[in-house]
Each structure stands twice: as structure tokens, then as C-alpha cells.
Image (spheres, helix red, strand yellow):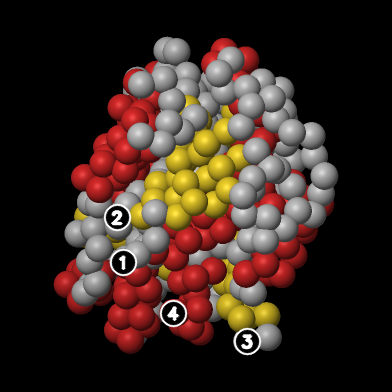
Amino acid sequence: MKRFTTKFAAAALALTLAVPALAEPVKVGMITTLTGGGASLGIDVRDGFMLAIKQAGNKDIEVIVEDDQRKPDVAVQLADKLIQNDKVDVLTGIIWSNLAMAVVPAAVGQGKFYLSPNAAPSALAGKGCNPHYFAVSYQNDNLHEASGAYANDAGFKKTFILAPNYPAGQDSLTGFKRFYKGELAGEVYTKLGQDDYAAEIAQIKASGADSVFFFLPGGMGIAFMKQYAQSEVGLPLIGPAFSFDQNILQAVGDAALGVKNTANWSKDIDNEANKKFVEGYQAEYGRLPSIYASYGYDTANLLMSALAKAPVSDMAGFQAALEAADFSSVRGKFSFASNHHPIQDIYVREVIKEGDILTNKIVATAMTDRDNAYVSECKM
């Protein structure tokens, strides 16, 4: 366990801006993945979150960070500890949707607020929505919906699609199919954490596909991309930002150049909040931020904007303050739909090279003011 507290660790979180103290101190429990497969995702969410607090100079938020090891049972144990022993006011941090499904319903059932910086499964957007649950990142289907729309615009008629067999993977392919108008050359669910894709690549090669859509975050995406490049199948690839994230690109190398991917954030979005974030992140951590870091950063700023209006103990007031989303998002315009998931633009990015660094740039807008497909199912 690591405690990041702006009250007692001034050296670690040097203040850059004087802000008024909150009416009451706040404890945040962050459960995220810091070791094993996918660790880079959790590290970036944590680092983005802590950067926002540092930049704001907030002295009254204590963040208790725990490593879920990408294991649902560990995440549940940590949530119980944070709620029962540490008495946290707010929970955040989970990357993986199967872990979110294990933790979030019980946490909000105990009256805790959960602000998701990544995982946003459809089950929590529709009938399972809750007044205390907010997805700050997206709804799981969103970026994949945009990939389906882009596949149409690109003229693809027979796309092979694959994703891991867990809630986010299922939402991924559902989202893609919701907007894609062509034929499916194949639809495959892989094992979560898989690192050998020889069988799937052979299926792609034999399928008659004219393109491939894949959602494989973290190490899964690195393994697939390297093996796909070596296979010389050569079909155009499409994916969400998670398959071509800043960390994945450096591991994959030039094989990713030119690939299109869909995202609700990019480092080249032109607004002051994003410039401050990108520059501050590079200065603080010595690397370019990823999309996960941007979500962590926005989550912290949403939290602080709500705390400036109402303490967590005023649950109705705090909920209303979160719903107002009165902060400057790195994504630009940002608001919540009635089921507490973002309304936002989604872009098409292309993998490029800046000097020796692979990164992404926006080349088109795939969707404008997209909410999600589950709003009408949420009855809170």
C-alpha cells in the first residue's frame, strides 16, 4: 500500500498554486493495477490523478493507493479494507471491467461514491446504473462504436473482429457492430491475458477479410501487434486507442505507423487544459502521457470541482456537483448523460513518429457529442 497525501507529503507533492482549503478533509481509495500485465495502465491513471492534485495545490485530499494485481478477488478485498478500515470517502482507479463489476456494485451499495477513470461496463450504464457511480472516461462501447463508423467511412466491407473474453471485450465488439455496416469475416473472443495469437492470425489470413478490428489493451496488444507484423498478413488494422496507446506504441515500434485508431483524447487536442496537462506530465514524469493518464487527470479535476461546491458528507449536494462537471477537461467540452457517463467527441487518430517517439495525431472526428446506447435503460 502507498499513501499519497497532500497534507503530509509536501516534498513529494510540492504546491504550485494556492487554493482554499476544503470544508473537510477527503480520503480517496485508489484500487488500480500496478504490477503484472497491464501495470502501465494503472501507473498512468495514478500519475495523472496525482499530477492534477499537485497542480491544484490541494492540501486536503489523501489518496491511498492499492495494487489489485489485475485479480478480482484482490480488488474486492482491497475495497473492503479501504471502506471498512481506512474509511475512505470516494473510490477510484480500476482499469479492468471484470474488476469493476466485482467492486463497484458493493461499494455504491454501501453509500460510497465511485469515480471510474477507465472501466465502464455496459452493465453499470444501463439497468445497473447508480446515483453514486460516475464513469469519467467513456462508456465501454464508445471508442469501438467510433471504430465501426470509421470502418464504414474507410470503405471496409469485410472486417475480422477480435477482443478478449471479459466484459470490456464483449462491449467492444458489441459497440463496433452497432455502427459497422459491412460483413464480418470472423468474430473471435480471446483469453484475457493471452500472449500467443498464432491461431487467431491464421484465422484472419484464411477469412477473406479486407481489414481487422481488434481491442487488446496492455501487453495483449503488444504481443498481437508484433506477431501480426511478423505474419505479413498485411490487412489494414483498426482499433480503439487502447490498442495503440502511448506505452504500447513504444513496445511495438514502426509496425504501428500509419494505423488508425479511435479515441476521445489525444495529446494534440488544442485547449489550455490539455496543454497544461501534457506539458506538466512530461515535466513531472519524463514521458508523454497516455490516454489512461488523461482519464486519471480528468477524474481528479472532476473530484476537486465537486468538493469546491459540497462536501462528500452532503451526498445529494456532492452528487449534484459531480453531475455539473464544472471543470476544464483535457478533452474540451465534457458533460454527463443522465446515466453518469460522458457526452463527448470521439476522434480518429493516426500513429505517427515525432523524432524517435511514436505517438498519435488526430486526423478526423468520428462522432460528435456521443453519449451511449444505455441511457434509456437507466432509471435512477
Q: Residue visible at 70% across and 43% down?
A: 58
Q: Which residue is mark 1?
A: 36
For marks 3 and 1, the one nearer the N-term is 1
Contact between marks 3 and 1 (CB within 8 A): the answer is no
* Amino acid type at mark 1: Gly
Disc 4 and disc 3: Cα gap in Å? 13 Å
- Residue 158: percent from left, percent from top: 35, 59
Q: Which residue is mark 3?
A: 356
Contact between marks 2 and 3 (CB within 8 A): the answer is no
For marks 4 and 3, the one nearer the N-term is 4
* Amino acid type at mark 2: Arg
* Amino acid type at mark 4: Val
Which is more foreground, mark 3 or mark 1? 1
Disc 2 and disc 1: Cα gap in Å? 8 Å
Disc 4 and disc 1: Cα gap in Å? 18 Å
The mark found on residue 70 in the picture is: 2
In the image, 240: left or right of 335? left
Q: Residue visible at 25% across and 52% down?
A: 71
Disc 2 and disc 3: Cα gap in Å? 32 Å
Q: Secondary structure at mark 2?
A: loop
Disc 2 and disc 4: Cα gap in Å? 22 Å
